[in-house]
Amino acid sequence: MIIKLIITDGFRSNGQCTSVKATHFPTKVPGIYKHIDTIGDVVSGEFQVVATDNKCFSIGWCCTRFSAIDDTCDDPWLTVLTRTPKPDPKCLQKADQVLANIWQLRLGDLTRVPHGQSCLPLLYPPKHGIF
């Protein structure tokens, strides 16, 4: 049986809530997934879950464009996701330490995308009727 992960990202674009679905298919290597971007303009290919803490954060890496000359990545994508809009400082310290250990990067080196007004009602609309 193949288990796939359906990812729904919700965000605001020009003040409007938007949601995008993507699919992660597991590979033979733990923590590495084949990522299928339904829009096809951001990431499609191998997505690596580099580190995760089930209570706090998840760090993922993938390549949006490989070099035509060799197998290096011309356009890497690194994402640090928190599980709550306002994470505990200890959570951020843990994620920061993981980044430092793996890539010699700090959270402060990355562009921070703050959580704005929630789009959760769009992603998880109230259910009505009998299910």
Image (cartoon, helix red, strand yellow):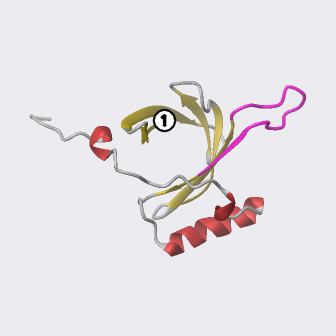
Q: Residues within 10 Å of mark 1 (few under 14, many from 20)?
A: few
Examine the structure image and report whether residue 59 is included in the region drawn in magenta: no
Quarter of the picture containing the C terminus is top left
Q: Is residue 1 visible?
A: no
- Which SS class for mark 1? loop
**Where residue 103 sits: x, y (%)?**
76, 59
**Where residue 127 sits: x, y (%)?**
17, 38
How many marks are shown on the rendered structure?
A: 1
22 or 18: nearer the viewer: 18
State which quadrant residue 47 falls in. top right
Q: Which residues are magenta?
A: 64-79
Left or right of 1: which side holds 98? right
Q: Is residue 118 above or below residue 83?
A: above
Q: Residue furthest front?
A: 14
Q: Residue at x 53, y 36 (%)?
A: 24
Q: Is residue 70 above or below residue 86?
A: above
Q: Is residue 102 visible?
A: yes
* Residue type at the position of mark 1: Lys
Q: Main secondary structure of the magenta part?
A: loop
**Where residue 30 sits: x, y (%)?**
63, 47
Q: Residue at x 46, y 71 (%)?
A: 88
State which quadrant residue 84 falls in. bottom left
Mark 1 = which residue?
4
98 or 33: nearer the viewer: 98
129 or 20: nearer the viewer: 20
Q: Residue furthest left?
A: 129
Q: Residue at x 12, y 36 (%)?
A: 128
State which quadrant residue 72 falls in. top right
